[in-house]
Image (cartoon, helix red, strand yellow):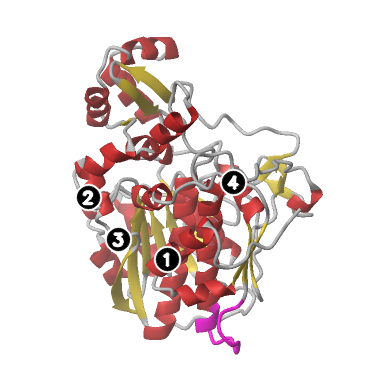
Amino acid sequence: MSTIIPSGFGPQQQFLKTLWCAAGGTADDLRHVTWSGEGDLPSVFETSSFAAASVAAAGLALASLTQAQGRSLPGLQRVHVDRRLTAFWFGTSVRPAGWTLPPAWDALAGDYACADGWIRLHTNAPHHRAAALSALKVEGSREAVTRAVATWRGDDLEAAVVAQGGCAAVMRSWAQWQQHPQGQAVLAEPLLDSRAGLPIDSREWGFTPSRPLQGLCVLDMTRVLAGPVATRMLAGLGADVLRIDPPGWDEPSLAPEITLGKRCARLNLRSPADRAQWEQLLAGADVLVHGYRSDALDALGLNAAQRQQRRPGLVDVSVDAYGFTGPWSTRRGFDSLVQMSMGIAEAGQRATGAGHPVPLPVQALDHATGYLLAMAALRGLAQRLHNGHGSIWRTSLARVGAELMRVPRNPAITPLPFDVESPRDWSNATENTAWGPARRLRWPLEVDGVETIWPHPACPLGSAQAVWR
């Protein structure tokens, strides 16, 4: 049963104010947001409120864009978020019919007890798996890894795996993270950093009132998972989203979830021919969303200023795991690792009395950051309509996660009913994905006058040509 949650109450309103004001919005805009849906994800944090607020912030940015497009409406349109559906989308939105998704995790990925605590190894990518095994000097069985990890101090093993090009994170508390050099660096950063870019050329953008991004090109240079969440939303609003991956990269368990509405191609940016083709794509893009480490594109001669020169007026949006300053600013990272590093998994363990790390029930840092990136892209487009300039935006999983840490959990919560097979939860149409038919959850966000429709079903990575439509 749904209920309207009164505006101005609850942690989700507190989260929304923080997220929306980070993009230059005002607290007064929050009166245009209504909520429905009961319950909460099983978490020691306000995870469902955090999820709902991030979707609402993207909805306010969408409403502000349509207002900038010249809608003759008094103020912003109504933005409505279904809290319950949002919680489900933060898990998975797709339900295969007659086929199954591959496992989400590699057999070696997970939490291990070390000599002085816990460490998480992220081994989903083959080169990350190889790096962990090389640091441990063992063969690839979980039993062998468990025995080897137990002989290491956590900090030493973390450093050894990272030195091999892999991904690992020691479990730290929130207090320890606030004293850590990287924790101090990222907590000193703004939630959403933004600066002006170069003025756009004279190319016009024809608006479609119900499809506000129709005619725009979004170059998606993101992988697991925040960036793809952002560009999935932009595709649903009418943008031509072209995702570029390097040869050999795959995300078999995620592709049916996050390629919805996109086209996916491959280019090797270290190849001169592919690099030239990518620069042609950039020259035609309205929005670039990328999740490369902060030094990766710089090393290719494609830093933020150079990208603006190649495409004046570009809305350039980027995400990093651990922040853009500090000793870990170039460290590889993922949601599950950041939860270990910054105290989320430790707080879960301590609150539940478990004998192991207890992370969030969903990858909420990735998903919430994804909607923050979508908010930034939409705000950047609205600003471009207003002043003719591009813009540069950036945030990180660790910085977004700090907002979740700072809001105490409300103990008087209602368990979320996970009856996702309820007919009201699902769209009526069957989605004919490349892997087989599937059902997709209803979109949890409504903005008056706007249709969120994905033009084609989910597709494999590398299945399209690297050209704009």
Q: Nearer the viewer, residue 31 or 110?
A: 31
Q: Which of 54 and 462 is in front in this view?
A: 54
Label 2 – label 4 distance at C-alpha = 34 Å
Residue lying furthest front: 412
Q: Earlier in the sequence, mark 4 or mark 3?
A: 3
Q: Which of 204 and 335 is in front in this view?
A: 335
Q: Do the residues labelled 4 and 3 touch (CB within 8 Å)?
A: no
Label 2 – label 1 distance at C-alpha = 22 Å
- Taking the magenta stretch, the answer to whether it contains residue 312 is no
Q: Is residue 459 visible?
A: no
The x, y position of residue 323, in whole percent, is 29, 50
Q: In this view, does 386 lie to the left or right of 452?
A: left
Label 4 – label 1 distance at C-alpha = 33 Å
Q: Which mark is residue 376?
A: 1
Q: How crowded is mark 3: few (under 14 residues within 10 Å), some or many (20 or more)?
A: some
Residue bounds of the magenta highlight? 66-77
- Taking the magenta stretch, the answer to whether it contains residue 71 is yes
Q: What residue type is labelled 2?
A: Ala
- Identify the residue under disc 2: 185
Q: Is mark 2 on a helix, strand or loop?
A: helix
Residue 126 higher or lower than 206, as above or below: above
Disc 2 vs disc 1: which is toward the camera?
2
Q: Earlier in the sequence, mark 2 or mark 1?
A: 2
Disc 4 vs disc 1: which is toward the camera?
4
- Identify the residue under disc 3: 190
- Identify the residue under disc 4: 412
Q: Residue at x 65, y 45 (%)?
A: 414
Q: Is mark 3 on a helix, strand or loop?
A: loop
Q: Which of marks 2 and 4 is nearer the N terminus?
A: 2
